[in-house]
Image: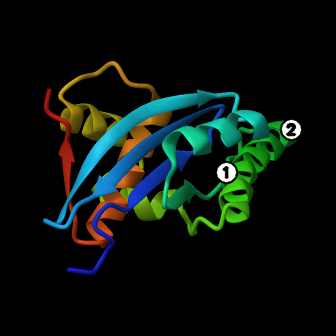
């Protein structure tokens, strides 16, 4: 198992229109607790700034923007800008960042290939034990599950 700080807070982001975010906190016992699963509406630089302050991450993982064929140039530009806001503001705060390709994290949670979106949404719903989450939240959760797996950490949910 890789050595990680005892309470590293990792913010995982799907930078879509309503950016899905999952915030995890690693523990010395080899587990990581899901603290937040949310959406940041719009994801303008101002909204991202306040989200970064609210979540106070020690590391930021952002899904790389891919170029889908059915997207307009304006839509692609908007996605790139949104991802850039997260990466730039984290970098300005000296927070380590990492980008991950969709195919990489999807394969890491067993949801790659044709129909990946439906599978990762179902995977996230099953892990949470509920189905009232958005596609962007499901992606952010699965990015977190992938990242934790690469570090040998066991993901856990908060218990009431």
- Where on the picture, by quarter, is residue 26? bottom left
Q: Position of residue 97 (x, y in %)?
A: 58, 66
Number of residues whose C-alpha sits closer than 10 Å to that of mark 1, classed few (under 14), some (14–19) or many (20 or more): many
- Where on the picture, by quarter, is residue 132? top left
Q: Position of residue 80 (x, y in %)?
A: 76, 50
- Where on the picture, by quarter, is residue 133? top left
Residue at left offset 60%, top offset 43%: 53
Residue depth check, mark 1 versus mark 2: number of the one nearer the observer:
1
Tag 2 residue: 74
Of the two numbered discs 1 and 2 on the same chain, state the one appearing first in sequence.
2
Quadrant in which the N terminus is drawn: bottom left
Q: Position of residue 116 (x, y in %)?
A: 40, 46
Q: Residue 113: which numbered mark, if any?
A: none
Tag 1 residue: 86
- Mark 2 secondary-structure assignment: helix
- Describe residue 68's horizontal placement relative to residue 105 as left or right: right
Q: Position of residue 33 (x, y in %)?
A: 25, 48
């Amino acid at each position: 198992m890789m050595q990680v700080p005892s309470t590293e807070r990792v913010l995982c982001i799907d930078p879509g229109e309503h950016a899905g975010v999952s915030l995890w906190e690693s523990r010395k016992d080899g587990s990581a607790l899901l603290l937040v699963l949310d959406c940041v509406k719009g994801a303008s630089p101002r909204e991202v700034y306040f989200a970064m302050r609210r979540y106070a991450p020690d590391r930021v993982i952002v899904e790389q923007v891919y170029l889908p064929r059915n997207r307009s140039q304006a839509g692609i530009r908007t996605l790139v800008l949104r991802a850039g806001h997260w990466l730039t503001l984290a970098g300005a705060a000296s927070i380590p960042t990492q980008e991950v390709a969709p195919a990489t994290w999807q394969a890491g949670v067993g949801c790659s290939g044709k129909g990946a979106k439906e599978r990762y949404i179902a995977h996230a719903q099953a892990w949470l034990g509920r189905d009232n989450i958005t596609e962007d939240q499901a992606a952010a959760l699965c990015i977190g599950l992938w990242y934790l797996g690469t570090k040998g950490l066991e993901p856990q949910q908060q218990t009431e």
